[in-house]
Image (cartoon, rainbow, N blue to C red):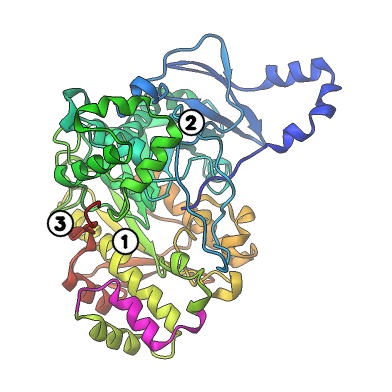
Amino acid sequence: MSPPDIHRRWVLAAGAGLMVAPAFAQTSALAAAPVVETTSGRVRGRDDAGVLSFLGVPYGEPTGGANRFMPPKPRYPWPGVRDCLEYGNSAPQVVGTPPAGHYPTPIPTSPPSPESEDCLMLNVWTPSTLGARAVMVWLHGGGLAYGSGSSRWTAGAAFARRHDMVVVTINHRLNTFGFTDLSAHGEQYAASGNVSIADCALALSWVRDNVGRFGGDPRRVMIVGESGGGSKVSTLMAFSPAKGLFHAAVTQSGVLLRADDRERAAAKTQRLLAELNLGPAEAVRLHDVPTEQLRAAGARANRGYGGWRPVIDGVQLARHPFDPDAPAMSRDVPLITGTNRTEESLFMGTDPAMDSLSNEGLRASIAAVVPPGEADRVLGIYKRLYAGHPNAEIAYCVATDRGYFLDSTLMAERKAAAGGAPAWSYVFARETPVQGGRYYAPHASEIPFVFDTLNIAAASSGPVTPAAQALAVQMSTVWANFAKSGMPSAPGLPAWPAYEPGRRATMVFDAPGGGAVRDDPRSEERELMAGFGSRQLQPPTPAPVA
């Protein structure tokens, strides 16, 4: 996912006008604003057209200095009433820029909110502080390296209003700051490789202890994540501190089957220390490295590794999240998992060369993602299955099926085989009309349909047509009803059978027809890729540092 948008900064430009506003008007507005008592102190939000919002609520102490790489600490209580009217800090992150001459991405790329190691903040939207509503907790995307819970796309007001639910989005540590395994450098670092996931678990503890005061029901909490957020959901399902803190789970376009083992995590840490000219006995000095310097060094140290990721630490994460099977810890948690039809078009499709991709270029793109010696066979199969389709679309489908689609079906299979609560599978196939339709159904394009925020997602979804809005209502209703009852349903949606290996029933969300159940869609592609095995079983091996 892309970095978050900044909200409400236009208010600063009107400062001169605000200075002449009557003082009593400001006092009256504050007096009418909602105030809620939390375990850390009172917070003041605002009423936005019937939905109460509380933005930038701290749930944990700052994570810099002595707290860096350490388990998160609940926020120390503050005196008085804290105004929570603007989004809080995002975690330190590195966001790449698209190459010159490429098409604009159909995902928002506006600057993130201010970054700080004081980033353990969350946002709450609720129709009322009274009642006991189901709760959706959103874990943002960004490949575990960037992103924020402060994106305009995932503002929870529309969802909360339409479905009478509480929505929570969170910020937490990322990349080097969230996944550096220093366990070999002192007992105090035993859990350092997963402090990002521990942050998420602390936020869920905050929800358990506080959401009732915002009109939520702590017994009906659904965690939802897209892309890297789906990896976080996968990990939380096997992360012992999170046990019992959520009651339904959804992964959108992101599944973490396997975490890093200690050996791989230690190799990344060694590279990080080398980038900073620190010896093995000097790991404690990492606490004093300036934020910007550590962020840059972490990005260099990780090159070739495929990302900073959760670690099997034997403390809080004792096993791979979904390999070789589903975690027993979440046996009774129902799951929805799914992908978009051409996820990889978001990443590959900005290159203008894709518009005229030759057969040789298509073969090269296939060879980059399948095992050695298999490119010609895969090319022949996809050329037959997608006869008459552009080479670019075929390239996107092969790359998507090799990773996102295969891994999502493996997650559904393993969850179904575990017994207990069921799993459901979906595919988002709605093709966006933006840029002439060249992206088809790209990564992240389902998000504004889930959040019912099409009105601010024209760059990704195109104009808000009646068919598009109907699909958004349908999808957001499915997610809401899943949180409320543990069953995915919506008016006009056909009955959605749980995923079983024999039938592999899958809901295909499209427009204008809405959702339709198909048994084992893309079965030949799935079987082909399953024969190769998940790419997560064979993570990239970087070249040694010179």
Query: Does 213 sit above or below residue 278?
Result: above
| Residue tagged 3 | 417
Residue at (58, 25) in percent of width and height: 84
Which span of residues is magenta-colored?
Answer: 355-372
Q: Specify whether 17 is left or right of 330.
A: right
Contact check, label 1 and label 3, Cβ < 8 Å:
no
Q: Specify whether 13 is left or right of 8.
A: right
Outermost residue to the right: 20
| CA gap, disc 3 and disc 2 | 42 Å
Residue at (47, 68) in percent of width and height: 441
Q: Nearer the viewer, residue 197 or 47?
A: 197
Q: Give the mark nearer the N terminus: 1 vs 3.
A: 3
Q: Give the mark nearer the N terminus: 3 vs 2.
A: 2
Which amino acid, mark 1? Ser
Query: Does 527 sit above or below residue 80?
Result: below
Q: Nearer the viewer, residue 462 or 300?
A: 300
Give the quadrant of residue 342: bottom left
Percent from the top left, x then y, of residue 175?
36, 42
| Residue tagged 2 | 116
Outermost residue to the top: 79
Percent from the top left, x then y, of residue 361?
39, 82
Query: Does 290 sit above or below residue 424?
Result: above
Which amino acid, mark 3? Ala
From the viewer's perspective, is the residue at label 3 or at label 2 nearer? 2
| Residue tagged 1 | 425
Q: Which element type, helix, strand or loop, lies under badge 1?
A: strand
